[in-house]
Image: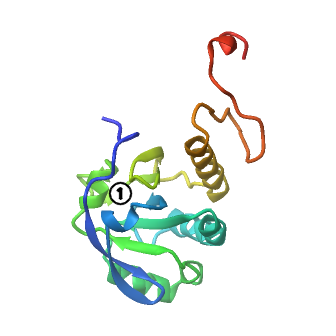
Amino acid sequence: MSVINTEIKPFKAQAFKDGKFIEVSDADVKGNWAVFFFYPADFTFVCPTELGDVADHYEEFQKMGVEIYSVSTDTHFTHKAWHDSSETIGKIKYTMIGDPTATISRNFEVLRENEGLANRGTFIVDPDGVIQALEITAEGIGRDASDLLRKVKAAQYVRAHPGEVCPAKWKEGEKTLAPSLDLVGKI
């Protein structure tokens, strides 16, 4: 079953952010835009390139009112150790959630049950806590934060402009579509 257009399920977890351990729950997410960025494990290979890419764009996400939550089945202690030992991970300012019970990974349907690891999954969540977009990739395929920014902008645009949709490759400021009988067969 797809989780698209469903409300995120309740969770409570320990996380690492800004040099501190914090608790994060589903209630903290609601009221703002959020991206949940699942990855298999700390101290690996593709994962730090992705998390570093998101870190490089974090300020842009923040200007758009978007909070980033990276999630793996590691603990918040492991996230801190990785943050302290890796130059790439050390630049992360967003919340790194530990999910050792795999509750959040199961909630978002990205858990590889037989391995206890999360797949590479990206979820855009609106201020109502509803999942508006998702992307799941195989372990060897890294994601691109620039494209994620574009998708978040499209999700925000559609929410702010009911009756309009963003076509393929849409970029902020470009023309959108207003689905109607007049457009049927003309695109």
The image shows a total of numbered marks equal to 1
**Relative side of 158 to 111, left or right:** right
Please state the horizontal and vertical placement of residue 17, each as a whole percent of the image.
Answer: 44, 82
Task: Identify the secondary structure beneath mark 1.
Answer: strand
Please state the horizontal and vertical placement of residue 179, each as a whole percent of the image.
Answer: 62, 22
The structure residue drawn at horizontal position 71% and vertical position 34%, both measured from the top left corner, is 176
Screen quadrant of the C terminus: top right
Q: State the scheme by which the image is colored.
A: rainbow
**Relative side of 117 to 161, left or right:** left
Q: In the image, is residue 13 above or below residue 116?
A: below
Identity of the residue furthest to the right in this view = 174
Q: In the image, is residue 93 above or below residue 3?
A: below
As shown in the figure, which amino acid type bears the numbered disc 1?
Answer: Ala
The structure residue drawn at horizontal position 31% and vertical position 47%, both measured from the top left corner, is 109
Q: Name the residue under label 1.
A: 118
Characterize the local packing of mark 1: few (<14), some (14-19) or many (20 or more) Cα atoms within 10 angstroms: many
Image quarter for residue 81? bottom left
Residue 156 visible within the image? yes
Q: Which of 6 and 159 is in front in this view?
A: 159
Residue 116 visible within the image? no
Q: In the image, is residue 115 above or below residue 85?
A: above
Please state the horizontal and vertical placement of residue 53, each as a whole percent of the image.
Answer: 62, 66
Q: Which of 126 and 116 is in front in this view?
A: 126
Please state the horizontal and vertical placement of residue 38, each as a whole percent of the image.
Answer: 42, 59
Q: In the image, is residue 38 above or below residue 136?
A: below
The structure residue drawn at horizontal position 34% and vertical position 82%, both measured from the top left corner, is 22
Screen quadrant of the N terminus: top left
